[in-house]
Image: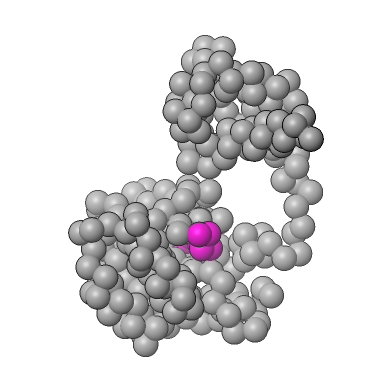
Amino acid sequence: MEDRKLTVRSVERALDILLCFTKNVDLGLTEIAVQIGLHKSTVHRLLSTLEERGFVIRDAATEKYRLGMKIWELSTHLSRSDDPAILLLPAMEKVRDHLGETVSLYLREGNERLRIQAVQSNQGIRRVAQVGARLPLYVGASSKVLVAFASPEEQEALLNDPEWPSLIDRASYMGQLHEIRESGFAMSFEEREPGAAAISVPIANRQGVVTAALSVSGPVNRLSLDTLYAFVPYLVEAAHDMGLMIR
């Protein structure tokens, strides 16, 4: 029984190491050890095993690790029929071509939003959106859309989270959520990232449940308030069509 527990613990630690790369392309041994709270010697042994199996690669020059080809091999066998990141990509490209700005697709995961797909703007000056990025739910147009259309219980849990920033007034935030539910979209200007503006609309699946947020973002000098308002009808229609494609 004890050996079984040790084996499960080792798997958990190995998975914790892999999850470190959700926010970073490459990491050093010390960085990983700090993130998961383990001794470097333990992390080194686990990394050696992961490297041997092809799940991570070590750069001899920088002594940093990155995800290996085995991860990508596994990803090719994911079910494509229900994956919104795959299903909605052509529609997102159409939105990008029509509006000329970067388009992102977000899902809610716990108290974060996860960017599962992005189509970069073709303009010389553009906002680059990294797929796989995890962002807080309390700030940004897409975050507020995902929270605005969540259940009251989920909203209450988020606002009562100990990590809720003290600088963000809960009553004001709830007022914003009410306005978003009423209007069907959210805007943000330099809330999370200096120089960036965004607009986001909800995507409801065929059962009418909001499962994702569609966002268009770019530099504030191009995305004025009037420009974002002009985007609304097209984005709402695009999100409606996307929702018919997912369960």
Left or right: 117, with 2 as reference point: left
Which residue occupies 57% across, 22% down? 43
Q: Quadrant of the N terminus?
A: top right
List x then y, in percent, for residue 228.
Answer: 32, 73
* Relative vertical location of residue 129 with respect to residue 187 in this rendering, above or below: above
Instruction: Find out whether residue 109 is within the magenta segment.
Output: yes
Left or right: 54, with 227 as reference point: right
* Relative vertical location of residue 231 with respect to residue 121 in this rendering, above or below: below
List x then y, in percent, for residue 240.
Answer: 55, 81
Question: What color scheme is it?
Answer: one colour
List x then y, in percent, for residue 59.
Answer: 57, 17
Q: Is residue 157 visible?
A: yes
Quarter where residue 121 is shown: bottom left
Q: Main secondary structure of the magenta part?
A: strand
Instruction: Find out whether residue 165 is within the magenta segment.
Output: no
Front residue of 10/191: it is: 10
Q: Which residues are magenta?
A: 103-110
Q: Quadrant of the C terminus?
A: bottom right
* Relative vertical location of residue 188 with respect to residue 174 in this rendering, above or below: above
Front residue of 46/237: it is: 46
Q: Is residue 147 visible?
A: no
Front residue of 238/124: it is: 238
Quarter where residue 210 is shown: bottom right
